[in-house]
Image (cartoon, rainbow, N blue to C red):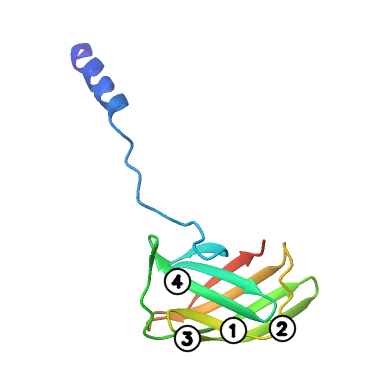
């Protein structure tokens, strides 16, 4: 049995690790959160919140999408509806987008059940 164990251990230690091709890095300068609907990247500006949707690093084609976003700044909060604009979701309004502020997005994408994603702005 020891004669088989040593070659087997050698093969296992040499074999490359199986790494899934997961790419959860922001592509648009925002903050990425992984959800059941895919990766949501929130890009926050004082007058607009944009959410990009991707799956394993590739943009998801959005046929229908809607939802709302809420930005929390201390005890204050600003809420706005998300609408489909091309290949992304947008919410227009007045938002406090300082680092450390929180955002909650609730989105329904391509007829699937709604998902919630929590973001910490940077």
Which of the two labelled residues, at mark 4 and mark 2, occupies the earlier sequence position?
4
The quadrant in which residue 60 appears is bottom left
The quadrant in which residue 57 appears is bottom left
Question: Distance between the Cα atoms at labels 1 and 2?
Answer: 10 Å
| Percent coordinates x, y for residue 41 in the rendering | 52, 67
Give yes or no for contact between labels 4 and 2 (Cβ–Cβ under 8 Å): no
Vertical position of residue 26 compared to residue 49: above or below: above
Question: Distance between the Cα atoms at labels 2 and 3?
Answer: 19 Å
Quadrant into which the C terminus falls:
bottom right
Q: Residue at x 32, y 41 (%)?
A: 18
Residue located beneath label 4 in the image = 53
Residue located beneath label 2 in the image = 94
Which of the two labelled residues, at mark 3 and mark 4, occupies the earlier sequence position?
4
**Local SS, label 4:** strand
Quadrant into which the N terminus falls:
top left
The reply, left or right, for residue 69 in relation to residue 99 is left
Residue located beneath label 1 in the image = 91
Question: Distance between the Cα atoms at labels 1 and 3?
Answer: 9 Å
Question: Distance between the Cα atoms at labels 3 and 4?
Answer: 11 Å
Which of the two labelled residues, at mark 1 and mark 4, occupies the earlier sequence position?
4
**Local SS, label 3:** strand
60 or 3: nearer the eye?
60
Question: Distance between the Cα atoms at labels 1 and 4?
Answer: 15 Å
Which of the two labelled residues, at mark 1 and mark 3, occupies the earlier sequence position?
3
């Amino acid at each position: 049995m020891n004669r088989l164990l040593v070659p087997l251990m050698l093969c296992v230690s040499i074999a490359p690790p199986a790494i899934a091709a997961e790419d959860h890095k922001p592509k648009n300068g925002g903050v990425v959160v992984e959800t059941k609907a895919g990766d949501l990247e929130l890009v926050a500006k004082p007058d607009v919140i944009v959410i990009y949707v991707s799956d394993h690093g590739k943009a998801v084609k959005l046929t229908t999408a809607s939802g709302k976003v809420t930005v929390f700044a201390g005890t204050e909060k600003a809420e706005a509806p998300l609408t489909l604009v091309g290949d992304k979701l947008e919410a227009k309004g007045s938002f406090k987008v300082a680092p450390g502020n929180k955002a909650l997005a609730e989105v329904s994408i391509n007829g699937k059940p709604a998902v919630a994603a929590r973001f910490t702005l940077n």
